[in-house]
Image (tube, grey):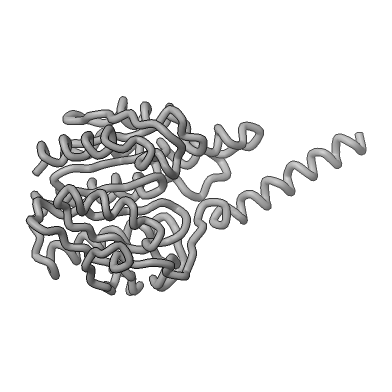
Amino acid sequence: MHIVIILISAYILMLVIVYCMQKYMLYFPEKEIVMTPGDINLPYEEITFKTKDGIAIAAWFVPAENEKGVLLFCHGNAGNISHRLDSIKIFNSLSLSVLIFDYRGYGRSEGKPDEEGTYLDAQAAWDYLVQAKEKVPEKIMIFGRSLGGAVAAELALRANPAGLIVESSFSSIPDLGKKLYPWLPVKMLSKYHYATVDKVNLVKCPKLIIHSPQDEIIPYTHGQAIFKKAAFPKKFLEISGGHNEGFLVSGQVYQGGLKEFMDKCL
């Protein structure tokens, strides 16, 4: 009986620790800007704009020659915008100008990250494009990778973009947590939802879902679940390689799929 009590107490303690530490298990921001688009010979503007709750968000606007449209870039849960130069270069080569921003608490952005906060950050980026840059919604694509896929899907509900791209993302945080921690009551514990799968069926614009069967962090089944739930029009692009380098490993398959989708949307 004493052993049972000890085990139950230890399990309850673990639940309390997991509940309290969720933010540190989800967000991995880095403050240092290690490179800029200028380091890869791309002109850019350093921008700061305010969210509706008064947080200053740092961003870059990277213009493309012969601009066909603009891509609003919602990045993943680690690092900051300076770790996304490979992607910026790819989008720039497709004649897409890019607005990439750091969530609150990341890079030079103020504040601390949380779910609603990241949604407000993305909304502020959209508002900046439409109001300050005077870009029309019909020429704006929203892109999100990993955690950013959930942020992008939420923004696509609130805005009216030309298209939505969700790459290497999870169906929801509780779904991913059940896979990683099957011995925990994840749904009961989770403070965060980021439920992409519950939003894509409500997003009206064309959608491109991208995922790799070799993704070692977010299982391929999550991409499939998002695609299955998404409302038409939609397209699925299967790439190869791991979570963080699949878009590079896949080369022309990836870039060709982006271009085909972009041309249809724009």
In percent of the image, x 42 and y 38: which residue is there? 170
Q: Quadrant of residue 120?
A: bottom left
In percent of the image, x 34 and y 45: which residue is there? 149
In percent of the image, x 46 and y 34: which residue is there? 215
Seen in the image, is 85 located left or right of residue 1?
A: left
Q: Compare residues 120 and 239 and report the one nearer the observer.
A: 239
Image vertical order of residue 50 relative to residue 187, above or below? below
Return the x and y of residue 193 as percentages of the image width and height: 44, 45
Q: Quadrant of residue 127?
A: bottom left
Image vertical order of residue 153 relative to residue 107, above or below? above
Q: Compare residues 110 and 186 and report the one nearer the observer.
A: 110
In percent of the image, x 22 and y 34: which residue is there? 257
Image vertical order of residue 21 relative to residue 175, above or below? below
Q: Compare residues 4 and 85 and report the one nearer the observer.
A: 85
Quadrant containing the N terminus is top right
Q: Compare residues 116 and 250 and report the one nearer the observer.
A: 250
